[in-house]
Image (tube, grey):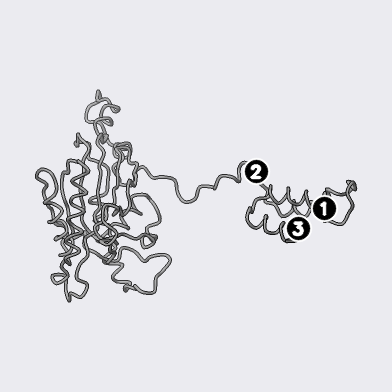
């Protein structure tokens, strides 16, 4: 292999300016740039082309610049400092700092969002779209996983659609203690917001985005927020619903662009875990976790 080909190969694999510079220096010392050894006068001028091709690395350019808006601590409209603004004191002797402290949330909410299991896609209506045998098995595995976490669950809320209701009923049998089941129409599947970039295989009408989007946003505001000041202990709540709803919730809770919800995928029976701190900080602990299922049980229908 010729030296020129070797040089190109090295630069192609390394891609670094330091490697390019060192290889070019070696070539220069052997006369590959057109002069004899020892001709140092003007030799380094040969590197002006190489230097021009290199990026202008500075300490500032090593770190990507922040994009988007700053974190809004009052995203759920429950920030105590915002709630107390403009309120008149009933008594002149009332300590404003004490009142604000009493109104601060002290507990952390953990919300485990479960996607329903596999269901009969050929059903003509919601009642016929029941879980398949594999779907029921997936729900059993999800229930076992939730039980194995050893958490004290406070409530199990589920979409009123058949596939979500069935999934919730199966999961509830595995949970320790008595956990109340609550059905909610707001959590039904739908089209939350037009996705960006668009997809060709799924194009709801504008009116569906208008109707479903308002409903799913209402569900987000009802269930995804920091703890009430009266809540004394950390809570663990399960919500069994649908892929579109969960993906939209995650984008909204993390203050990501909500139109990016369709860029994420969720397996049936998967677990997505959001943690909401008293300060209003939100953390995504798991997204679509289904590693507790055998590979042959994984579906995304």
Quadrant including the N terminus:
bottom right
Instruction: Determine the residue positioned at 25% across, 31% down.
Output: 89
Q: CA distance from mark 1 to mark 2?
A: 24 Å
Quadrant including the C terminus:
bottom left
* Rendering coords of residue 91 (x, y %): 22, 27
Rendered view: 201 above or below 41: below
Which mark, residue 3? 3
The local secondary structure at tag 2 comes to loop
Which residue matches tag 2?
Answer: 58
Which mark, residue 292? none
The residue most toward the left is 178
Q: Nearer the viewer, mark 2 or mark 3?
A: 3
| Residue 5 falls in image quadrant | bottom right
* Rendering coords of residue 282 (x, y %): 34, 44
Instruction: Determine the residue positioned at 16% across, 65% down.
Output: 133
Q: CA distance from mark 3 to mark 1?
A: 18 Å
* Rendering coords of residue 34 (x, y %): 87, 57
Which tag, 2 or 3, sits closer to the chain's start? 3
Which residue matches tag 1?
Answer: 46
Q: Is residue 55 left or right of residue 71?
A: right
Which tag, 3 or 1, sits closer to the chain's start? 3
Please tell me which residue lies in front, 107 or 166: 166
Please tell me which residue lies in front, 198 or 123: 123
The local secondary structure at tag 3 comes to helix
């Amino acid at each position: 292999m010729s030296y020129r080909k070797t040089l190109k190969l090295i630069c192609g694999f390394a891609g670094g300016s330091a490697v390019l510079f060192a290889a070019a220096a070696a070539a220069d010392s052997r006369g590959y740039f057109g002069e004899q050894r020892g001709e140092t006068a003007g030799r380094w001028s040969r590197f002006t082309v190489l230097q021009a091709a290199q990026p202008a690395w500075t300490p500032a350019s090593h770190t990507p610049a922040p994009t988007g808006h700053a974190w809004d601590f009052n995203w759920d409209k429950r920030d105590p400092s915002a709630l107390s603004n403009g309120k008149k004191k009933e008594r002149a002797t009332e300590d404003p700092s004490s009142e604000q402290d009493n109104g601060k949330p002290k507990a952390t909410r953990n919300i485990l969002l479960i996607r329903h299991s596999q269901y009969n896609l050929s059903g003509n209506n919601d009642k016929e779209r029941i879980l398949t045998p594999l779907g029921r098995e997936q729900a059993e595995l999800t229930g076992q996983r939730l039980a194995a976490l050893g958490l004290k669950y406070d409530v199990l809320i589920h979409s009123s659609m058949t596939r979500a209701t069935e999934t919730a009923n199966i999961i509830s049998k595995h949970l320790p203690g008595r956990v109340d089941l609550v059905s909610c129409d707001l959590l039904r599947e739908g089209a939350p917001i037009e996705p960006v970039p668009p997809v060709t295989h799924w194009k709801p009408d504008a009116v569906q985005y208008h109707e479903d989007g308002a409903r799913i946003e209402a569900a987000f505001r009802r269930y995804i927020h920091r703890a009430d000041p009266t809540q004394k202990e950390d809570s663990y709540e399960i919500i069994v619903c649908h892929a579109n709803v969960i993906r939209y919730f995650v984008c909204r809770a993390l203050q990501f662009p909500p139109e990016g919800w369709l860029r994420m995928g969720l397996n049936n029976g998967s677990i997505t875990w959001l943690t909401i701190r008293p300060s209003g900080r939100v953390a995504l602990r798991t997204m679509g976790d289904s590693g507790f299922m055998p590979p042959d049980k994984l579906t995304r229908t």
